[in-house]
Amino acid sequence: MKKTIRIIAILLIFVLIFIFLNRLLKPKYAENLVEGSMINQYYNEPKDHEVIFIGDCEVYANFSPLVMYEEAGIKAYVRGNSQQMIWQSYYILKETLKYEIPKVVVFNVNSMKYDKNSEEVSEAYNRLTIDNMKWSKEKIGIIKESMTEDETFLSYVFPILRYHSRYDELTEEDFKYLFKNKENTYNGFLINKNIKPVGNLPVKRVLASYGFSSECYEYLDKIRELCNENNIKLVLIKAPSLYPYWYDEYEEQIRKYALENNIDYYNLLEKAEEIGIDYSMDTYDAGLHLNITGATKLSKYFANILMENYNLTNFKGDPVYDEKLNEYYEKIK
């Protein structure tokens, strides 16, 4: 009996050490590479959003849900990540619908440009999107669909297999956020107050092909079908990002898809002047993304489109959101 207890105790200690090392060595995404902290911040939020955004950096950098609340009383959340591929958007939406059913899902179509063979697909971006997801069928699905040739499924199950060499790179951040997460966004919006005006944009390259891949259309169909099954209005958008280029051929394909499937599509890049975006002041990286002033203008503009067209509730006066809004304005001072 004593021997059995001793063996169980040793195994228990081993398991606890293994769990501890997994947490310690995995990047915390708290003060560096904060984009990796976005995915898990959703889980602690109240699940009462009528609008959910999915997509890449063109949503989390450009749309501020709290500005949309202030403007039109909309409760929205941005489930965006850096270089979020369309198959990842599908699984993130599927996971979201386990927690709540919004009235509107807004999908930014920029990722239609990339298939699984694109050079933009990388383990680094996969990790920012996947590492902090809760375990579920959706997480298993997103891992299997996203893994590059050099990745293994087990390295997502046990981060120590991927990050074991970080032991000599540990910082104070790794210990400070060992058992807690840092809130880096406001309803999924990542604030950036810097200003870097648009200068000389790269020359437009002539591409070998402008057609979207069949796998991208497959996942766009899946997103559409998921929304239809849950009586959700799907809205497609193109955010006002000047670079990488959104070619006319891309635009034509999205417009055709939207028309054929009775989906609303808003090219907000074309509406930049009407929105009031000034690319000498409203971008933090020379036109790739909007800064806080640009995002505020875009969010107000799009909030009114949503409120006028999709039978949303005006939640103005909600004490939880009013408190969030006060914290938000303290942050952006």
Image: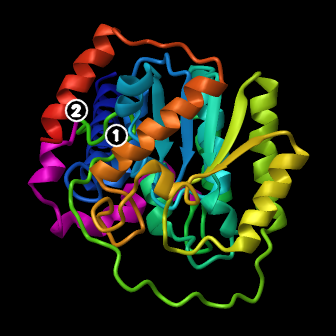
The C terminus: image quadrant: top left
Q: CA distance from mark 1 to mark 2?
A: 41 Å
Image coords of residue 118 (percent x, y): 64, 76
Q: Residue at x 35, y 61 (%)?
A: 278
Which mark is on residue 15?
1
**Along the line of sight, which residue is nearer the eye, 185 or 255?**
255
* Residues under numbered marks 1 and 2 in contact, where contact means CB atoms less than 8 Å apart: no
Query: Residue 13 at what x, y percent from top left?
Result: 26, 37
Residue at left 70%, top 46%? 265
Q: How is the image coloured?
A: rainbow
Residue 90 location, quadrant:
top right
| Residue sitting farthest toward the left | 172
Q: Tell me if residue 44 can be seen.
A: no
Question: Three-letter amino acid code at disc 1?
Answer: Val
Prevailing SS of the magenta stretch: helix
Whichever of callouts 1 and 2 sits on the residue coming sooner in the sequence is 1
Q: Is residue 271 above or below residue 323?
A: below
Residue 165 falls inside the magenta stretch: yes
Q: Is residue 232 magenta?
A: no
* Left or right position of 84 against 197: right
Residue 74 sits above or below residue 135 on the image: above
Q: Which residue occupies 62% across, 74% down?
A: 149
Image location of residue 73, percent across then percent down: 43, 19
Q: Secondary structure at mark 1?
A: helix
Q: Which residues are magenta?
A: 153-179
Which residue does the numbered mark 2 point to in the structure image?
328
Q: Secondary structure at mark 2?
A: helix
Q: Residues within 10 Å of mark 1 (few under 14, many from 20)?
A: few
In the depicted structure, whether residue 249 falls above or below residue 137: below
Q: Is residue 229 left or right of residue 18?
A: right
The crowd level at tag 2 (other Cα within 10 Å; few <14, some 14-19, many 20+) is: some
